[in-house]
Image (spheres, rainbow, N blue to C red):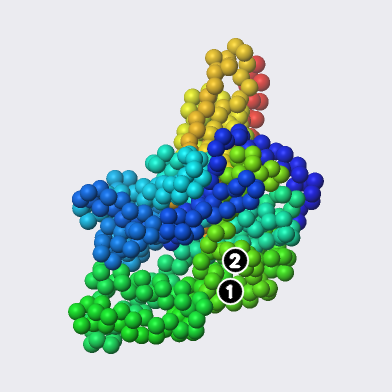
Amino acid sequence: MIKNATIRGARHSIQRALVPRRYKHNVIGIDLGTTNSAVAVVGSDNEPHVLENDEGKRTTPSVVVLEDNNHKTLVGLPAKRQALLNPRNTFFATKRLIGRKFEDPEVQRDIRNVPYKIVPDKQGDAALQTSAGRNISPSEIGGLILEKMREIASSQLKEQITEAVVTVPAYFNDSQRQATKNSGKLVGLNVLRVINEPTAAALAYGCDKTRKEGVVAVFDFGGGTFDVSILDIEDGVFEVRATNGNTHLGGEDFDIVLLHHILASVKNQTNGVDLSQDHLAVQRLREAAEQAKIELSTADKAEIKIPFVRDNVHVDMTITRDEFDAMTMPLIEKVIDPVKRCVRDAELKMKDIDEVLLVGGMTRMPKIRQVVAELFGKEPSTAVNPDEAVALGAAIQGAILSGQVKNVVLLDVTPLSLGIETYGGIFSPLIPRNSAVPIKKEQIFSTAVDGQTGVEIRVYQGERMLVKDNKLIGHFKLANIPQGPKGTPQIAVEFEIDADGIISVSASDKTPYPSDSPHYGKPNSVSIQVTEVGLSDSEVEKMIEESERNKNLDEEMRRYYEHASRADILVKDTEIALIQFGEQMEEAERNEVKAETDKIKRMVEDIRSGAKLHDPKLLTQALNEMQQKCMNAIKKIAEKQQKGV
């Protein structure tokens, strides 16, 4: 745990950022889930409550049916009931597509496993297509589900709801967070904040007065995503120390594994009848697979009986819990590495975790609970309803924003480092990963070449020392910098990540020009909002793994690149000196200096291209010889001029 003084100091500075104003009406909390969604609100008793839908249920299926003929839209349970009759226009699990490009490998994998059509839109993003050929974005589907949640809240609370807090997976990237906020805009719902699902669950857990303070691991395994976060809970402050996960791993994948098992069994038992291309049959089998998965959480076996799935083909089979555990074990094992990395990033050991909180419907699966217990060395807590905890936490955050709940502060983190490219291809991070957000960081840089009139700011996300190993997420140019010696301009680069995890980058010329300069008092700045981060969970995991695996090599390479950059700058200085004094040098001296500069340029190119890593000592020796020969020649010129005078 961090010290109380540190927490309280953070609280006062962060609370102003988290409570910008008081909202007149109720701010609801929405868990926009992959499989099911829920809405909650903090009542007059200052306790969060999940609101029931028209069917008296506390969760609503995240399913939408779009009928082109009469423009009818169904959302929730009525939509799910029509899935068998209208599979091409029934859209489910679309949260996994939100903010993703069509070419994303995970989108391509989903195309093979859903009955509806996924197509690229004009921007290359993943879009959904109805049977009549109308395209609709996953954000629009999300908006319809959010609208349904708002209708439930308005009906229950007897007032028009206009503002909400919506949850997202902790590993959602910038574009996915933006797309989630846009879903609310499309239906006129003001999304005040998007917060991470495991963090919301921790709020629901920690705001219960009976809970202990301490270090809590939130293991959130839902219908479409998996997240794990480590939080400190103390004195009303919820500080996320680290987060990790997989935005394309959830209950839907377990359903698909069981579906493929059923399809294979039918094919074997019927001498080759393949139902995989029969959309109606596949939808019936998918629903049976989901129901069997649910039953196996409380029973040792589940029977799957579907008469006349096609003509004279019937399905009559039994799946045992052991069989289901065995066929889904490769999926379960995918949670192990993210958990270990998260604990390591939090600078803790498993024994330091006071309690493990289970969230999400998949945590009802006994095998998953067993794996979690083995990982952390303690039985996980089932004190909160895994289907409702996230919505309850979102409602608490809404009440914090409205001023209804006081003395609670939420400090979340960013999952990857953010920085810029500096001279020589070196990555200079401004915001390290697992930094608390909202956050703003500024750093002063300068030019590396004399007379430089513009600088290109290239923004990267990743953990490696060199930009070539990280992900470029945006770039822009600050122009109209007055010519001057290298190192003179003062270029301030500022990174800002808001409470939603949205990234903005700006650069400004802060050189103190004299009052008689034409640039005095004239602002010169440029900024962008990064909206196309486009990092999939597999890319994030790969970056972190490669960073840890190559830590020593990266540090060594950084030294080589720094030497190469220094050599490059000194060579440029020497070449400028040759231009200025070359005609006054003796030909042999001029040729010697030129030969030395060419030799060093080749060494620098070898290092940059990876062809050969020259010993830094040899590079330094060559630089010294080049500089000495150049200085000797210039000294002779000065002596001749002095004698001439």
- Disc number placed over residue 358 in the picture, else none: 2
* Figure check: 56 above or below 318: above
Secondary structure beneath label 2: strand
Q: Which residue is mark 1?
A: 369
* Figure check: 50 above or below 488: below
- Please say if the residues under marks 1 and 2 sit with CB atoms less than 8 Å apart: yes
Taking the spot 25% from the left edge, 68% from the top edge, the residue there is 279
Secondary structure beneath label 1: helix
Residue 528, percent from left and from top: 48, 36
In which quadrant will I find the C terminus?
top right
Taking the spot 23% from the left edge, 87% from the top edge, the residue there is 271
Q: Say which quarter of the image contains residue 219.
A: bottom right
What is the C-alpha distance between the residues marked 1 and 2?
8 Å
Taking the spot 20% from the left edge, 83% from the top edge, the residue there is 312
Q: Amino acid at mark 2?
A: Leu
Q: Nearer the viewer, residue 640 or 178?
A: 178
